[in-house]
Image (spheres, rainbow, N blue to C red):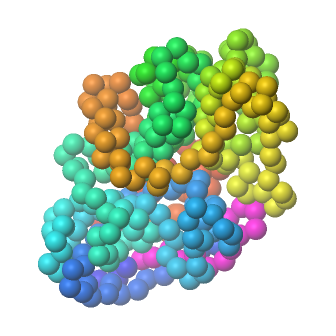
Amino acid sequence: MMNKQLLFVKRPVGEADASTWSLVSNPIPEIKEGEILIRQHYISLDPAMRGWMNNVRSYIAPMEIGSVMRAGSVGEVIDSKNHPKFKVGDFVSGNGGVQQYTVSDGKGYYQVDPKLAPLPTYIGTLGMPGMTAYFGILEVGKIKEGDIVVVSGAAGAVGSIVGQIAKIKGCTVIGIAGGADKCKYIVEELGFDAAIDYKNEDVKSRLKEECPKGLDVYFDNVGGEILNIALGRLRMHARVVICGAISQYNNTTAVKGPSNYLSLLVNRASMQGMVVFDWADRYGEAAAQMGKWMAEQKLKSKEAVYDGIANFPETYTRLFSGEKLGKLVLKVIEE
């Protein structure tokens, strides 16, 4: 059997394009004692991928040139050599990279059940984006009933879940998203109280209109000017969660930082970065709670699924163009 793999071959300057990767086919290696062979079904595409390509110090080591493109994945164990935890027929999720098959010792993988939820959900709401939203808004944002919560990137994989959890916890939620369709989606389908269309509305005036007394929690996925505007609306003891800064990831110039940061001082507010790996020992807890909310129809999951490993570069661009709703997923299994 041959394995189609997407190799990372060039560090991009600014936006990544098709020349950043190379699609190759290699024989699948024989598995060794204690290893498993996974036939991958779906690959997760996340904005964080852009940061992994940079040769800079970060929360995770940069990717090496010539390596398989890093990505979360979900698939089926099709061979096992006496693995103590996984057997043939198990479905598992982990970091298998952008390839059709992966060999692993099982470290970092956990079993999933396709009878309880579709496989793409395990790399979306019940995967890393869901974990990020859950711990980001509850542990870092420390929301409480009655809080005014503002979420940027509100129609995306993380933001859409953040807003729904905040609603479940009794908060008023305002989402910032790009385009009328996304704004309609987060209000009418996800239950947000209001939406601000950053592409067609003045965010500063609309935020003042929706939060006349200010905001208690700002969950930031975009950085840049929208972060700056949100800092100007903080209430006393507000919390700002720095999850991502997608507006800055493809910069060829210096990252634009907030000039409004003194609002943190005036309002005795806090701004804290978060990386989901810090809560790895509690993923099971989060998945169980979110699974319960999904069963009770309090939490909705949406995945935008595209097909074909060869289409990775084109699909990847949707992370930054905004041409998708919810979690971006690539199907790599060939029937």
Q: Is residue 104 above or below residue 219?
A: below
Q: Position of residue 290 (x, y in %)?
A: 34, 35
The answer to whether residue 246 is visible is yes
Which residue lies at the image location 32% right of the left edge and 59% below the top edge?
93
Task: Classify residue 25 by image quadrant.
Answer: bottom left
Q: Is residue 272 above or below residue 85?
A: above
**Magenta stretch holds residue 182:** no
Q: Position of residue 199 (x, y in %)?
A: 74, 32
Q: Is residue 1 left or right of residue 314?
A: left
Q: Nearer the viewer, residue 122 or 34?
A: 34
Which residue lies at the image location 62% right of the left edge and 31% below the top edge?
239
Which residue lies at the image location 59% right of the left edge and 19% below the top edge?
148
**Magenta stretch holds residue 14:** yes
Which residue lies at the image location 71% right of the left edge and 43% below the top edge?
223
How many marks can you see?
0
Q: Position of residue 183 (x, y in %)?
A: 60, 26
Q: Position of residue 323 (x, y in %)?
A: 60, 44
Q: Which residues are magenta?
A: 4-17
The answer to whether residue 123 is visible is no
| Quadrant of the drawing holding the N terminus | bottom left
Q: Is residue 36 above or below residue 28?
A: above
Q: Is residue 132 above or below residue 55?
A: above
Secondary structure that dominates the magenta span: loop
Task: Classify residue 180 by image quadrant.
Answer: top right
| Quadrant of the drawing holding the C terminus | bottom left
Q: Nearer the viewer, residue 93 or 236?
A: 236
Q: Nearer the viewer, residue 306 or 240?
A: 240
Q: Nearer the viewer, residue 165 or 199?
A: 165
Q: Is residue 333 left or right of residue 315?
A: left
